Image (cartoon, grey):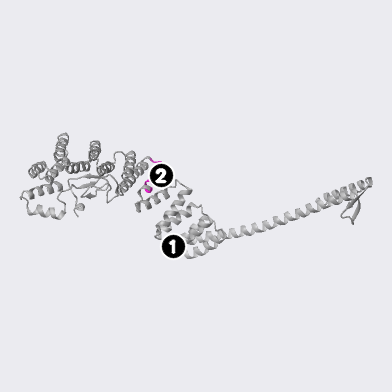
Amino acid sequence: MYTKILLVVVIIILSAFFYLHSQNPTVVTFVVTKERTYELPVTLLVFIGFFAGAVLAVFNSLLVDAKRAIREMRAKRERKLLAQAEESFRKGSELLVKGDTAGARELMEKALMSKPADTGMTLSLSETYVRENRPKEALKVLETGLLNNPNSIGILIATAKCAAESGDEFRAAKAYEEVLKHDPKNIYALKRLRDYRVGKSMWAEAASLQKSIADCERDDGLKRKEKRLLTGLLYESATQHAGEGNLSEAVARVKDVLKNDDSFMPAHMLLGDILCRQGNVSNAIKVWDKAHYRYPNSEPLMLRIEDAFIKESAPDEILERYKREIISHPNDTNLRLLLSRLYLRLEMVDNAIEELERLHLEGEDTFYPQILLGEAYLRRKQGNKAAHLFQKALGLDREFYPPFICSNCGHDSRSWTARCPSCGEWNTLAMSSSLSSSGKN
């Protein structure tokens, strides 16, 4: 049918040509050069132009068809290679599941040669080395994969894990940083990078990462937990600045802590310490006083206030303060123990014995009262050998700092710290009049 149509078109064209040729006998002189000219009928010149255009169109069509044929051949070959790669990957994955890592690796390497930018194949090939506990080899595979697919979050996270397992913490941290460039709210990368910053005591950066974590958390319970950790990290940042002598920056960080959680007692203690270092003892006492009256378990604040008054040679003021506190809180055993301790510090031994014996008669016969009473008896040369040995075995200093217990994990500590050395939680140590066996060791 196509041939017949083409024949009809040719006949029409030729008929038109002969008709026009008979109706237009005019001859045109066609000059090529001065010496060479041609005389051609007008219709022939038009026909030659038309014929030349038709030839060019046919040639162009042939060229397009040839290019299409070449592309189709290449696509067919690529589809064949990709199909072979997929088949190799499938077989390799099956072998990996069966535990044949060497066989799986051979097939996956073959598959990856055909699809070098395939994230799944890169990760699976690295997994064969991970299964054999060869993180450095896995890391090489992943870094090659990153060259072909630099924006792959999956490969970046796998790179960080392998770098950490091979001991290259710097490379792991850099990989997590790259993840966060592409996905700033990636919780996993934020937490892992935060842990690296904590491990390096880079508290300011750790706090910044933790703020992002807290902002990303949607569950109310988890959000509160993350904010508690943020408070602790901000506090450590403030402590670090204070330790480096950058007191103004330390105060700014303390304010961030209190803005996040104004009941965080270590921040109040640190703020007072900074004010003392700046020579402003009276304001430091005001800071500690305010926090002491607002929050429970604030005995460490009282100890700070006590030290400040003694250093200022004003022991009478702290004695009166303790007595007023005890009148306001007659059932607070800790305040009475702290008063007894202060009596001993001031060599008011008879007062200490009187208060401690009264506590003993009231049934308070735990570790700390025994130690204080034993020391008081020793100073009056009434101590017995058992009390002396008990004191010596505990190795307490002569100021008999009270023991503290962590409200989170129950760990006993012989001194107050902002962070529990056992569970790592901040602001959990509270004064305890007893000490468990773990605290005696």
Asked if the residues shown at circle 2 and circle 1 are in contact, with their CB atoms under 8 angstroms apart, the answer is no
Q: Quadrant of residue 111?
A: bottom right
Q: Secondary structure at mark 2?
A: helix
Q: Badge 1 is on which residue?
A: 136
Quadrant location of the C terminus in the rendered image: bottom left
Range drawn in magenta:
205-219
Mark 1 residue type: Lys
Res. 98 in view: no
Tell me the crowding category of disc 2: few under 14, some 14 to 19, or many 20 or more residues within 10 angstroms, Cα based.
Answer: some
Question: What is the x, y in percent for residue 230?
Answer: 35, 44
Main SS, magenta region, reads: helix
Earlier in the chain: of badge 2 and badge 1, it is 1
Residue 346 visible (yes or no): yes
Q: Give percent across and percent down for residue 283.
A: 24, 38
Judged left or right of residue 382, residue 220 is right
Q: Amino acid at mark 2?
A: Ser
Question: Where does label 2 land, which residue?
Answer: 212
Residue 297 figure quarter: top left
In x, y percent, where is residue 90? 53, 59
Residue 318 position, x and y percent, is 16, 39
Is residue 115 part of the magenta span, yes or no? no
Judge left or right: residue 349 versus residue 215.
Answer: left
Count every numbered label the image shows and give the total: 2
Residue nearest the observer in this picture, 141 or 212? 212
Question: Residue 110: which disc?
Answer: none
Dot 1 lies on which element?
A: helix
Q: Label 2 vs label 1: CA separation?
A: 31 Å
Q: Nearer the viewer, residue 326 or 316?
A: 316
84 w.r.t. 220: above or below: below
Q: Nearer the viewer, residue 97 or 254?
A: 254
Side (left or right) of 338 relative to 129: left
